Image: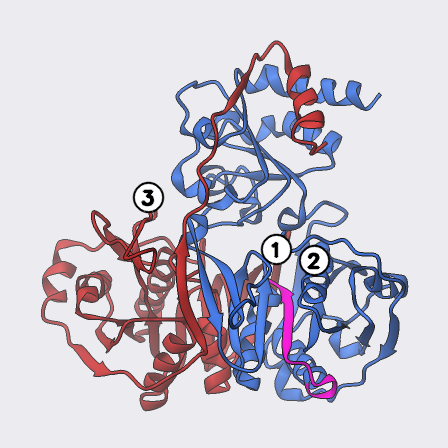
């Protein structure tokens, strides 16, 4: 089996979910080629060897500096043809998921997105997908010879003992028709931990009482190196930007630690966080349904507990 | 201008999910079905465009007869007519093939749908239809405006958003805040009963994805409560027990 992995980057650095995608590919047991598109730092690419890539193709063309889905999909299709890959693994993301669809339709592959675990290959090739917006899973068998798999965060552990991978320039054919969608501007929080990539998330709900109180939540997040999130009412009321909304109709997250402050825990919110490894709930209301989904809970006033917690973490760091 | 809005028929967001037949069938007992919440945003934006440009809006659903009340609701909200492709929507590739077949038979300028269905959550139907029809597809779209033949959109990306532009024809997967959900009024509900709802047979499609079984997440253990006066205890537990700090 030969596996191609499309690795995504942010500000020149390979994303963590893409490290996991390479580790996922390596766990399939074949040879692994990674493909990076656009501007990515060279040592970030050689470092992909650690996770199991034997070779890295780098398509660095001026026309590919912007993430244009159709153009990237066409580059990936050419890399699949060149390497003879049977399987494409990539991250389930705003870029990876539509690319997965384009590529699968072009090469006639079985397609599975939202994949949460390594495949079961005892008979056939089955993958586990998240369905019902985080409330359930299904195992599906991918029956076509070619397969495209988009993995969610934590589907594989980004670890490995490989060495440096050899990086080769990849010069794909680039067609004008792939640029029918023009990106005319990008606004992105820079230098912050991206919510879907974060290992720790501190999230606030209506219990925070207003956007002017977010400072104490952000201080805790800063101390923890965490990203900040929020509940749906908070983004609906415009207290926080929409891309921070965690839940069934927002971002689904899988951090190591999710700290929910002043969020009651409606079933729609829980659907977005229930793959978190540990959940801490801080809420004034002892009957908040979120406590039933939590590992640790504090019944108390967020405005008193948050600053104390920030201090305690500072103190524990020494 | 002709707009096609593809809607899914899915369990209400508050539904508890369970399975029967040895975890191979979804248990519909006590479950209320709705228009997919993201599809509802797409429909609301289509109705706004109908009001501002005089476009016609057709809704399409891939489903068995049980989905007709959901389709009628879309008609009550303001769609002009509807198509039901008579088949179980088994997977994304199957559904996309049906949409592409209908869109080939009758050309549409704009095909809108939700960014994903809240049952299967693949988030790829718009992109697959785009690949099948060779029409550009954009998702998830938070804002969509027409300027002649140019479509100006805001697309959500991790940690932010980007502005994108394309020419019609176009496919968009929608999400909030593209438009406010619309609630059908009495006149809409009355007129929906007589609006045309065409039932068409499905076309063959094999996406090479076969369901093996469903699985529910393991139940959580009891929560460990910590006194608000002793947050050091929480830090200690996160360090030594959970090992996440």
The picture quadrant where one finds residue B227 is: top right
Q: Secondary structure at mark 1?
A: loop
How would you rate the neighbour count of disc 1 (Cα within 10 Å): few for under 14, some for 14-19, many for 20 or more?
many
Tell me the quadrant of the picture where the N terminus of chain A can be found: bottom right
Q: Are marks 2 and 3 on the same chain?
A: no
Q: How is the image coloured?
A: by chain
Residue A89, image x and y in percent? 64, 69
- Identify the residue position indicated by label 1 in the image: A155
Chain identity of mark 1: A
Q: Secondary structure at mark 2?
A: helix
* Res B114 visible: yes
Specify the farthest residue to the front: A122
Would you place residue A213 above or below residue A250 in this image?
A: above
- Identify the residue position indicated by label 2 in the image: A20
Does residue A283 appear left or right of residue A73 in this picture? left
Residue A196, image x and y in percent? 62, 50
Gap in Å between the C-alphas at discs 1 and 2? Answer: 7 Å
Q: Residue at x 54, y 80 (%)?
A: A109
How would you rate the neighbour count of disc 2 (Cα within 10 Å): few for under 14, some for 14-19, many for 20 or more?
many
Does residue A282 appear left or right of residue A160 in this picture? left
Image chain in blue: A
* Res A209 visible: no
The span shown in magenta is: A81-92
What number is the disc on residue B14? 3
Image chain in red: B
Tell me the quadrant of the picture where the C terminus of chain A can be found: top right
Q: Is residue A150 in the magenta section?
A: no
Q: Are marks 1 and 3 on the same chain?
A: no
Specify the farthest residue to the top: B229
Residue A212, image x and y in percent? 59, 28
Chain identity of mark 2: A
Is the Cβ of the residue at disc 1 closer than 8 Å to that at disc 2? yes
């Amino acid at each position: 089996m030969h596996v191609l992995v499309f690795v995504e980057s942010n500000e020149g650095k390979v994303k963590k979910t893409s490290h996991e995608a390479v580790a996922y590919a390596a766990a399939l047991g074949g040879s692994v080629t990674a493909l990076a598109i656009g501007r990515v730092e060279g040592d970030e690419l050689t470092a992909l060897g650690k996770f199991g890539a034997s070779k890295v193709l780098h398509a660095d063309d001026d026309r590919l500096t912007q993430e244009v889905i159709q153009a990237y999909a066409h580059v990936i299709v050419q890399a699949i043809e060149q390497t003879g890959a049977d399987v494409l693994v990539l991250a389930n993301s705003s870029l990876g998921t539509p690319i997965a669809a384009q590529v699968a339709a072009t090469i006639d592959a079985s397609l599975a997105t939202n994949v949460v675990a390594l495949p079961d290959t005892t008979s056939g090739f089955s993958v586990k997908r998240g369905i019902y917006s985080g409330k359930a899973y299904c195992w599906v068998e991918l029956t076509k010879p070619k397969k495209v798999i988009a993995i969610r965060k934590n589907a594989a552990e980004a670890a490995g003992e490989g060495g440096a991978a050899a990086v080769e320039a990849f010069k794909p054919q680039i067609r004008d028709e792939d640029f029918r969608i023009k990106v005319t501007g990008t606004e992105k929080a820079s230098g912050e931990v991206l919510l879907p990539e974060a290992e720790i998330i501190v999230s606030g709900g209506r219990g925070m009482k207003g956007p002017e109180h977010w400072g104490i939540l952000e201080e805790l997040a800063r101390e923890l190196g965490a990203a900040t999130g929020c509940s749906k009412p908070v983004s609906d009321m415009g207290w926080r930007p929409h891309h921070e909304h965690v839940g069934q109709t927002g971002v689904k997250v899988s951090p190591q630690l999710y700290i929910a402050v002043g969020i009651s825990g409606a079933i729609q919110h829980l659907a977005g966080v229930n793959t978190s490894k540990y959940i801490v709930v801080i809420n004034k209301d002892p009957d908040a349904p979120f406590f039933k989904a939590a590992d640790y809970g504090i019944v108390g006033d967020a405005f008193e507990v948050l600053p104390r917690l920030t201090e305690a973490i500072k103190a524990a760091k020494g | 201008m002709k707009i096609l809005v593809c809607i899914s028929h899915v369990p209400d967001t508050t539904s508890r999910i369970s399975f029967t037949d040895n975890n191979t069938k979804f248990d519909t007992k006590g479950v209320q079905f709705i228009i997919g919440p993201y599809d509802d945003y797409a429909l609301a934006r289509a109705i706004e465009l109908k009001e501002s440009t005089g476009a016609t809006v057709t809704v399409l659903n891939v489903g068995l007869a049980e989905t007709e009340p959901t389709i009628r609701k879309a008609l009550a909200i303001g769609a002009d007519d509807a198509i039901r492709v008579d088949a179980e929507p088994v997977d994304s590739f199957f559904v996309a093939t049906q949409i592409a077949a209908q869109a080939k038979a009758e050309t549409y300028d704009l095909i809108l749908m939700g960014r994903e269905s809240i049952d299967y959550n693949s988030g790829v139907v718009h992109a697959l239809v785009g690949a099948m029809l060779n029409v550009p597809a954009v998702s998830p779209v938070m804002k969509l405006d027409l300027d002649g033949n140019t479509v100006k959109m805001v697309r959500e990306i991790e940690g932010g958003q980007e502005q994108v532009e394309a020419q019609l024809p176009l496919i968009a997967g929608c999400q909030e805040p593209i438009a406010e959900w619309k609630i059908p009024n009495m006149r809409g509900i009355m007129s929906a009963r007589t609006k045309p709802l065409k039932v068409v047979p499905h076309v063959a499609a094999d996406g090479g994805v076969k369901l093996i079984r469903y699985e529910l997440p393991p139940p959580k253990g009891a929560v460990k409560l910590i006194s608000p006066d002793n947050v050091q205890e929480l830090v200690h537990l996160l360090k030594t027990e959970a090992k996440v700090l």
